[in-house]
Image (tube, grey):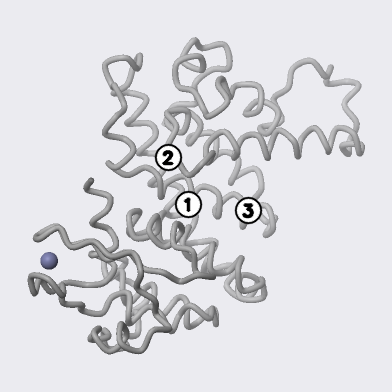
């Protein structure tokens, strides 16, 4: 994992939604050089703390704008590892960092990344390798965070728990599922069923519609074994139930089998939902 130096030209190549992210990263990492160290207060005063929060918000706005993927993630992710380490013991900050990282990784899917022109990105191979290494470290740190702070996570409000669960899904298991669930408007609750085989495409399916529900064979409840992260369904269902997230009830339907009304193709609802990502 490489921390790209702040004076590297790569910051002008690997951009976020609003351009060069170097300054915001520098502030968030506490590496702003124009504050002479002898005059640095022991505790940040109010104004500086505000500057910090603005840079922290900018950092995520740059990576998450309109739920798209930005190449800056490739050089920023190793700094995120350091940020997690710097904030060890600070539950709220870690919760926020992990929630945002997950949202960012949910957009690191071929649907977005296939348009990236790698030949135009300097040092792509080494930068990408460093990014992948950073993600493996973040994955382990996320597991530790969940183990160490389960009760604190459970005490968060329902929306925050649901979003955190999707972030954990993106970091630990399945980015495309996390992406689809982030993008679904759960107030409206409409599910887009798109069949790759015959082209059937219907956006008006609702989990509170009896006839739609009846057409799904729900997946049987399975308890996660606490070890195997390959079993996405078992992990996700158990995680949401243990956290007492309302959406836990939806999981057997999301992973339930649905039959395409046009061609008879059978697969999981979540896979019909993901079909739009192959457009
Ligand atoms: Zn079909």
Residue under pointer 2? 134
Give the CA separation, mark 2 to mark 3.
Answer: 18 Å
Give the CA separation, mark 1 to mark 3.
Answer: 10 Å
126 lies left or right of 168: left
Question: Which of the labelled discs sits on residue 102, or is there none?
Answer: 1
Locate residue 53, reporting x and y percent.
75, 39
Which marked residue is nearer to the observer: mark 2 or mark 3? 3
Which marked residue is nearer to the observer: mark 2 or mark 1? 1
Disc 3, SS: helix
The foreground one among 190 and 34 is 190
Looking at the rendering, which quadrant does residue 41 occupy?
A: top right
Rendered residue at 57%/73% (across/down): 150
Disc 1, SS: helix
163 lies left or right of 171: right
Residue under pointer 3? 96
The quarter of the picture showing ligand 1? bottom left
Locate residue 182, reporting x and y percent.
46, 58
């Amino acid at each position: 994992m490489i921390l790209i130096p702040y004076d590297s030209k790569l910051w002008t190549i690997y951009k976020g939604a609003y351009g060069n992210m170097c300054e915001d990263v520098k502030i968030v990492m506490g590496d702003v050089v124009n504050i002479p160290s002898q005059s640095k207060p022991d505790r940040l005063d109010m104004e500086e703390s505000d500057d910090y929060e603005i840079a922290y918000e900018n950092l995520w706005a740059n990576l998450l704008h309109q739920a798209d993927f930005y190449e800056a993630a490739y050089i920023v992710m190793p700094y995120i590892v350091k940020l997690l380490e710097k904030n060890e013991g600070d539950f709220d900050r870690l919760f926020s960092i992990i929630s945002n990282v997950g949202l960012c990784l949910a957009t690191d899917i071929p649907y977005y990344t296939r348009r990236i022109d790698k030949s135009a990105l300097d040092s792509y191979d080494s930068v990408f390798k460093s990014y992948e290494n950073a993600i493996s470290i973040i994955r382990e740190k996320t597991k530790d965070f969940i183990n160490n702070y389960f009760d604190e996570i459970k005490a968060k409000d329902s929306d925050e728990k649901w979003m955190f669960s999707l972030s954990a899904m993106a970091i630990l298991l399945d980015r495309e599922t996390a992406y689809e669930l982030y993008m679904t408007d759960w107030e409206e609750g409409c599910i887009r069923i798109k069949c790759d085989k015959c082209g059937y495409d219907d956006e008006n399916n609702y989990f509170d519609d009896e006839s739609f529900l009846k057409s799904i064979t729900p997946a049987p409840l399975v308890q996660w074994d606490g070890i195997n992260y390959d079993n996405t369904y078992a992990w996700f269902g158990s995680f949401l139930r243990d956290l007492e997230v309302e959406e836990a009830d939806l999981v057997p339907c999301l992973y339930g089998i649905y039959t395409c009304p046009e061609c008879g193709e059978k697969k999981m609802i979540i896979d019909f939902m993901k079909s739009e990502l192959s457009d």
